[in-house]
Image (spheres, helix red, strand yellow):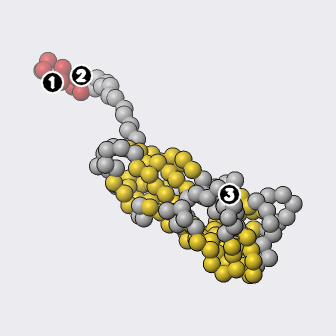
Amino acid sequence: MKEKILLLLLYFLPFSGSLMAQVSISISKNTDMNFGTIAVSSGGGTVLLPASGSRTPSGGLILPSFTGTVSAAQFTVTGEPGYSYAITLPIADFILYESGAGPATMVVNAFTSTPSATGTLTGGPETVLVGATLNVGASQAAALYTNAAGFEVIVNYN
């Protein structure tokens, strides 16, 4: 009878445990996307800024010899070697707003990245480059266009 009571008492004794969490992957921004200086000559058009960073105009746009700062967005992905990750880019239009007095806007869309959709960490940080297309109107006001909110790039590990 004593054995049964002893067993029941041990069953109700509290046990302590440990809690742990490990973040296996992270992303940080290094460089903002910048389309540089653009001139409208006749009608609107687009400026393609691929992840490689070399821009291409179309329509009535000119890229002046003074380019200003031109850069694809750059992010660093870090984590455990061998982990693969998926990249999610904006799918909706992203709006740039004229700084200063005017209400003018431009649309940025067709985001692309290198790597394009997935990557694998191979023993060190990986660089993700993001480009897009800038849509410029025929009578676009000369100004600096920005969006302080920024766009979102999501990296999920697999």
* Residue, disc 1: 4
84 to the left or right of 55? left
- Front residue of this view, candidates 136 and 60: 60
- Do the numbered discs 2 and 1 sit on residues whose CB atoms are within 8 Å? no
Give SS at disc 2: helix
Q: Secondary structure at mark 3?
A: loop
Q: Mark 3 is on which residue type?
A: Gly
Q: Work out whether 43 lies above or below 36.
A: below
Residue 21 versus residue 67: which sits nearer the camera?
67
Name the residue tied to disc 3: 68
Q: Mark 2 highlights which residue? A: 9
Question: Mark 2 Cα within 10 Å, few/some/many (few <14, many 20+)?
Answer: few
The earlier-in-sequence mark between 2 and 1 is 1
Q: Is residue 93 visible?
A: no
Residue 1 visible somewhere in the drawing: yes
Expressed as whole percent of the image width and height from the top left, the position of residue 79 reads 38, 44
Q: Quadrant of residue 23?
A: top left
- Upstream in sequence: badge 2 or badge 3: 2
Looking at the rendering, in which quadrant would you find the N terminus? Answer: top left
Which of the two discs, 3 and 1, sits closer to the camera? 3
